[in-house]
Amino acid sequence: MKILITGGAGYIGSVVTEECITSGHETFVVDNLVKGHREMVHSAARFFENDIADKASITRILDENDIEAVIHMAAYSLVGESMADPSTYYHNNVVAGLELLDAMRATGVSKLIFSSTAAVYGEPKEQPISENALLAPTNTYGETKLAFEKLLMRFDAAYGIKYTTLRYFNAAGASERYGEIHDPETHLIPLILDVAEKRSPHASIFGDDYSTPDGTCIRDYIHVTDLAKAHVLAIEQLGDTSKTYNLGSGGGYSVKEAVEMAAKVTGCEIPVKIVDRRAGDPAVLVASSDRIKAELGWKPELTELSYIIGSAWKWRRTHSRA
Ligand code: UFG
């Protein structure tokens, strides 16, 4: 299939591009490189440095390359930043995405995979979280993703654009080629590996008074390669019915467990400081991924936290960074 990946120069996008190529798809990447990195785009993908808000350029790219399906991953994804600057988040995650959908309509491209997030659920009452849980985001980031999900529903009903929405839990780890680089970095695993590498003196644990066994928050870490494989299955099996799936490993690890595992995997000391809770962090977020397992035959394979953290560590040790 000829697939266009928006945001293919980002952390998750680079691994999704890699998996599409490995699965034999002709792969095209569009990224404006505001957050993405040119060197993270697989050499077998054709790259376009464009903004998805530029409808004329995207229309031309879709048309000239006979694109059959789009994986839409280009977005801003920091919760804190989204609260400080909602305008930018609504523009990038909703308005620009709307331009992309209009370009798809103009060129008759009717298949889309959308990167959504566990943040659409806010602070759910029940764990593990199923796709039927209440949608109640507590931050602008989650709201923009939910807004786009709703938009997709309307575009399906009115214009026949078929989609699969994938709600990611905590993507982590690295493939052999691609790993996580964010600036600024806010995610737990890269931050604790910064401490192992002595790039920072200690890790901060955001609160140890949650109602969890060790008092720190529990998250469902999913290896980025498992996540990427779900995109390939989703695009290959997308038919006449649009779908929404959670994507997690189905297990939860606490912040303290992640720090301890990182110390074990790296053999380095990781000093921690307990600091105040971070606003808007739910105590526990664990996915039920039963629906995607049953319907698409997806199965996470790299579920051990030691492997997830180990792969991120290995990638760092083999890819020099400033
Ligand atoms: N944490 C710390 N210290 C840090 C960084 C994080 O204790 O320095 C904790 C957080 O409080 C949280 C856990 O580690 O409990 C994981 O935090 P991350 O920032 O790595 O990930 P989040 O769970 O906050 O965010 C992820 C995605 C978001 C998405 C969210 C859904 O990265 O895009 O899940 O709730 F919105």
Image (tube, helix red, strand yellow):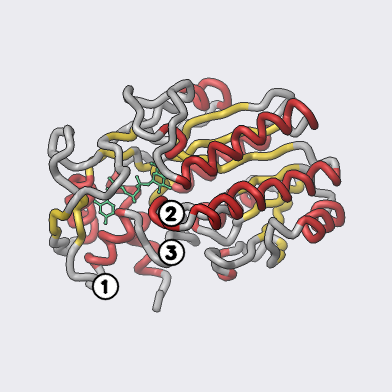
Q: Which residue is mark 2?
A: 78
Cα gap from disc 3 to disc 1, whole angstroms: 14 Å
Q: Kindly identify the amino acid type of the residue bearing the numbered disc 2.
A: Leu
Q: In screen coordinates, is 93 left or right of 314?
A: right
Picture quadrant where residue 282 is located: top left
Q: Circle 1 — which element?
A: loop
Q: Quadrant of the C terminus?
A: bottom left
Image depth: mark 3 or mark 2 in front = 2
Cα gap from disc 2 to disc 1, whole angstroms: 22 Å
Q: In screen coordinates, is 258 left or right of 169?
A: left
CB-based contact (under 8 Å), mark 2 and mark 1: no
Could you tell me residue 21's position as x and y percent? 65, 52
Q: In screen coordinates, is 269 left or right of 129?
A: left
Q: Quadrant of the N terminus?
A: top right
Q: Residue at 50% across / 40% down in the picture?
A: 143
Cα gap from disc 3 to disc 2, whole angstroms: 14 Å
Query: In this orientation, which residue lies closer to the viewer: 268 or 241?
Result: 241
Q: Residue at 84% across / 57% down in the picture?
A: 60
